[in-house]
Image (spheres, rainbow, N blue to C red):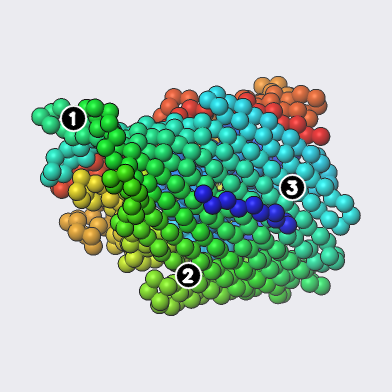
Amino acid sequence: MKRTLLILPVLAWLSLPAFSQEPVDKTVSLQSIEIQGKRFGGLTGGDVKRLQVDYNLSGVTGTTADVFRQLPSVVTDIEGGITFRGSSHPGLLINGVPYGLMEEYSGDMLIQLPALFFNRVSMTATPSIELVPDGDAGVLNLSSTAYTDKDSPLIVTLGAGFQERYNAGAILNLHPGKFHIVGKYNYRREYRKRSFSKSTTNKAGTTVMNNNASARPDVHLADLSVGYDLTANDLITVYGLYSLMDYSRYGKIHNNKLVDGNLQPVMFRHRYNDQRQEAYAAEARWSHTFRNPENRLDVTFNYNNFTYDEDNAYKNEKPETGAIIAEDNYFVNQDKNNYYLSAIYRTAFANDLNLHVGYIGRFKDETYLAEGNKLANGNWEPDMQKLNDFGFKRRTNLLLASLDKSWDAFYAEVGVQAEMNWQNTDDATRTHFYPRVKLAYETDKTGEFALSYTQRAIRPYGVDLNPFVDRSDATYIKKGNPDLKDEFIHSFELSYLYSNNHFRLSPSLYYRNKRNRIMDIATSSDNETIWQKENIGHSQTLGFELSGTWQPIRILSIGLSGDIFRDEIDGRTIGYDEKKSLVCGDIKGNINIAITPTTELQLDGFYISDQLTPQGKIKHRSSVNAGISQYFMYRKLRANLSINNIFNGLKETTIVDTPDLQITQVRNRDAQVTWLTLTYNL
């Protein structure tokens, strides 16, 4: 397997607001449409909701996927896939920048990324004009707390859980002179078990597949930031990130056929799989404040690389005799290079009028190579059906401008992003405009109404456009679609936020209208189920979200959020007779109790209803979690015990029900996880 050793000079994202251990005072700023109140279980913010991982007791010892579930209307499945307001395609960013490792393999990353590494997550349905317009229902962002010279110079974390789970990390925080240096490292190891079953009925009859697999992933994460105060008005930061996920797994696939009501084994297929996902990034930022402190220029350059290296060895076993009747192998190598450049200038005029102008450039270069062999008469021979060499390039340039103005209690913003996009799959250059409008009215010092319209896009990944059939995983055989078009979304939202020292309430009414909606479609061929992404035409979603938190007394806070929406899919462009619709939703809650000054308890859970797909649905699922923290040594030492998925309710069942094809597919893994973690602040 390809292995790389990288030594990165690195950098900082130090322009984030400093984190405070105390509840923040309530402030209202219509210019940024940001209302912050006291923290409730770590959640703060208005239009942009932020969750401080340290305060989330059931997720702090877990993964980023566990923490994302605490955000209103955000749910993650057993494989780390994210659903936000019914959409499985939100924008995923790290410090506001798109990364290759947060694309088609983001689920793998999120169920392994330790929650404390990027210890702040945020969400917004109306992202800033300064961010890329990618993502359906909005944007989810991972970022790190900005450590100051008042914070601990060294933080060490050690954790262990059942089933061979281990975690260790350290944070170094130094501020000599004009320098600001923060370095982090985290290692995580798990032993995971997965189960998979699928019953497929078509014109040829019924087949049943069962697969139980186990894996031992090792995950290394490190970053280093160096900031330097060049002048009183200039901050230079450089940043570097390194991630490595390396694991081996074994699975035995049972292929059976239903004959006269009885399952007859056809073949056992053994899969030995080694997988390596590696990513690194180098970034530089310059922030300059002009003589007028309201005039500012921010420049960011980021290069990030992601490589995916997979080796597979297969053996087919005859059930009756146990003899190996065939052997083959399959190798996949994918390399993704992402370049990001932005320059944003902000200036203020008289009468509270502000102008934002800027440029965002995104450039992608990807290569995909697959090859395999089969054993014939004792000799290994190339299997030309497995050979695939594919290259993908995309060039996206965005010019942006917006004006915003405040009149006492009123605020208005209007803006547009103008895009030129080229990709080598069709060698065509396309232009598109993403307009946005936002109006806000402050009712008093504790509340605000907001009405917004934004347009966004979902772009196919390179692998989605690759016409090759990928059979590396027999439980999910996929084929790319070179004719896949970009999906465009019109989003409207009417929201209200009320916040005081003890209570916050945030209802939102939203509507999304989609053109060229991208969804997975299953087809059956030669007793194989092949999944391919298709543009299924017009689609729309109308929903209502409500989130609230109440702190009746100092030691208790209660949070509740719910989302209900009507999802409609028009599949007539791909051969279906009529539109489909389903009322879907989710509900979640949490209780945080300070039992003593040094003991804190959190209970939380969620339930997500059946979700609509073009050919059927994904059935409901749920999770209940708990965490407790005990502080020692004047709060320098913290012990945290957590258990996730207490009632094992995350099992995922997908139903496909069409005239020619019926599938019942069930996925599950050992998501019932218990962790004990110790954190020491020097």
- Disc 2 packing (10 Å; few <14; some 14–19; many ≥20): some
Question: In this view, which residue lies farthest toward the right?
Answer: 177
Which residue is labeled 1 in the image?
264
Residue type highlighted by circle 2 = Arg
Question: What residue do we see at 13% from left, 28% from top?
Answer: 261
Q: Specify whether 112 is left or right of 290.
A: left
Number of the label disc, if any, that sits on residue 183: 3
Count the numbered circles shown: 3
Q: Quadrant of residue 316?
A: top left
Is 507 on the left or on the right of 649, as rendered? Answer: right
Q: Mark 2 points at which residue?
A: 394
Q: Is residue 560 above or below residue 226?
A: above
Q: Does residue 424 appear in the picture of this structure? A: yes
Which disc is residue 619 wearing?
Answer: none
- Dot 2 or dot 1: first in sequence order is 1
Where is 420 relative to 569, above or below? below
Q: Residue furthest left?
A: 260
Q: What element carries label 2?
A: strand
Name which of mark 1 and mark 3 comes first in the sequence.
Answer: 3
Residue at (40%, 77%) from the top-left corner?
428
Q: Position of residue 109 (x, y in %)?
A: 53, 45
Place of residue 492 in the rendered image (x, y in percent of width and height, measured from the top left)? 44, 60
* Image location of residue 230, percent across then percent down: 84, 65
Label 3 SS: strand
Q: Do the residues labelled 2 and 1 touch (CB within 8 Å)?
A: no
